[in-house]
Image (cartoon, rainbow, N blue to C red):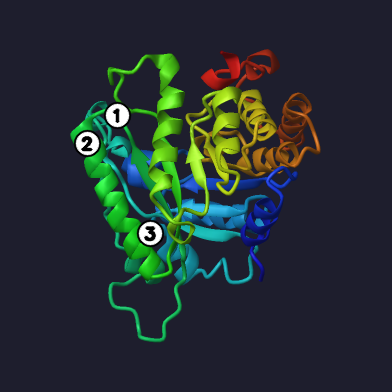
Amino acid sequence: MQKTLDAKLADIRQNPKNNTFIIAYAADADMSRGLATLDDRSGSMQTFCDELVTLVEQANIDILLASVANMDILAREKCIFDDSSVTPAVRANDTTDIWNARGSNYTHYPSKPFATTTIEEAQYGTLTPAPDQQPDINLGLYSVTFNNDLAADLHSLECFKAFRTEANTKDFKYFLEVFNPNVADCGIAPEQIPHFVNDQIARMLAGIPRASRPEFLKIAYNGPETMEALVSYDTSVIVGILGGTTSTTYDAYKLISEAKKHGSRLALFGRRIKGSEDPLAFLEVLRLVADGDTSPEEGVKLYRSKLEEKNIAAQRSLDDDMVLHTPGLID
């Protein structure tokens, strides 16, 4: 079955200003939070994967991002992507700034590059695939975080170069996540951080031919000015946003709407979806907002009406659910 991601990427590359929007669900929190990934709905990773099957069947997402271990269940055991329009993807590296085990303090230090998996394991689920074996997964998320730290940033770039070189030789596609600095005192004024990130992205991509470039970018939404600047700098680069922490329904829907208005063509949400009262209903409305079929304000009302129909209690009052929290939306 044709994947919606392939069709949408082709559409966007042909016309960067069209209405097409890609939604990815980040279900890879087990590579960050371990056991804390599970909630009251998910008693085990197997149950968690069953929930992901339902989301894939709903087909309101274009990409499902999961850990390599869970893709063994989803793509190889259950084979859910064989007859689905959804594209499977795995986290190709797990840098130290996402090491969020309870009681840990790794995230307070400048990000260091690391990858638990290998490209072969990501693609085939084994280090020794058969000579004629076709990959089950052929898309990965690679993450880089710059902290204005010469040694740390240089090491991150060296590892990224090694990864993209190997990925190219193995025909493994990837998308690139560039976080804002994870260290609070990185020597950059807060108002300069969005420009710092943009400049680092442009400088990094300048040394990479298109054949080795990522399929798209994933960055924090730092406001309309810097989003438009990055999008217009090189129109061949597709820019997407990350979702960040769990927030209000309006904050999530408004983030999609505003980012798209200013040039983003993709969003990767994880905790915002997983932390909602009803992920299926949340995604159903999120798709309507992303496609421009309803406004963020009306989307909140529609989502809450769906909760009422299912007798699911809302976590917040309507007034509280209409509060914005993302800095790029309220600055």
Determine if residue 326 is in view: no
Q: Residue 129 at x, y = what percent?
A: 34, 79
Crowding at dot 2, Cα within 10 Å, few <14 / some 14-19 / many 20+, comes out as some
Which residue was labeled with disc 1? 147
Label 1 crowd (10 A; few <14 / some 14-19 / many >=20): many
| SS at mark 2 in the image | helix
45 versus 230 height, above or below:
below
Give the residue type at disc 2: Ala
Q: Residue 95 or 14: which is nearer the viewer?
A: 14
Q: How many marks?
A: 3
Tell me which label, 2 or 3, sits earlier in the chain.
3
Nearer to us of marks 2 and 3 is 2
Relative to 9, does residue 72 appear above or below in the rendering?
A: below
Figure quadrant of the C terminus: top right
| Vertical placement of residue 47 versus 97, above or below | below
- The x, y position of residue 146, in whole percent, is 32, 33
Looking at this view, name the residue that lies furthest to the left: 151
Secondary-structure class at tag 3: helix
Q: Is residue 98 left or right of residue 78?
A: left
Q: CA distance from mark 3 to mark 1?
A: 28 Å
Numbered mark located on residue 68 in the image: 3
Give the left or right position of residue 23, taking residue 301 as reference: left
* 1 and 2 marks in contact (CB < 8 Å): yes
Asked if the residue under mark 3 is in contact with the one under mark 2, i.e. CB atoms within 8 Å, the reply is: no
For label 2, the residue is 152
Please provide percent x and percent y for residue 99: 28, 38
Give the residue type that dot 1 points to: Asn
What residue is shown at x 45% (from left), y 78% (from top)? Answer: 134
Quadrant housing residue 172: bottom left
3D distance between C-alphas at marks 2 and 3: 26 Å
How many other residues sit within 10 Å of disc 3, few (<14), some (14-19) or many (≥20)?
many
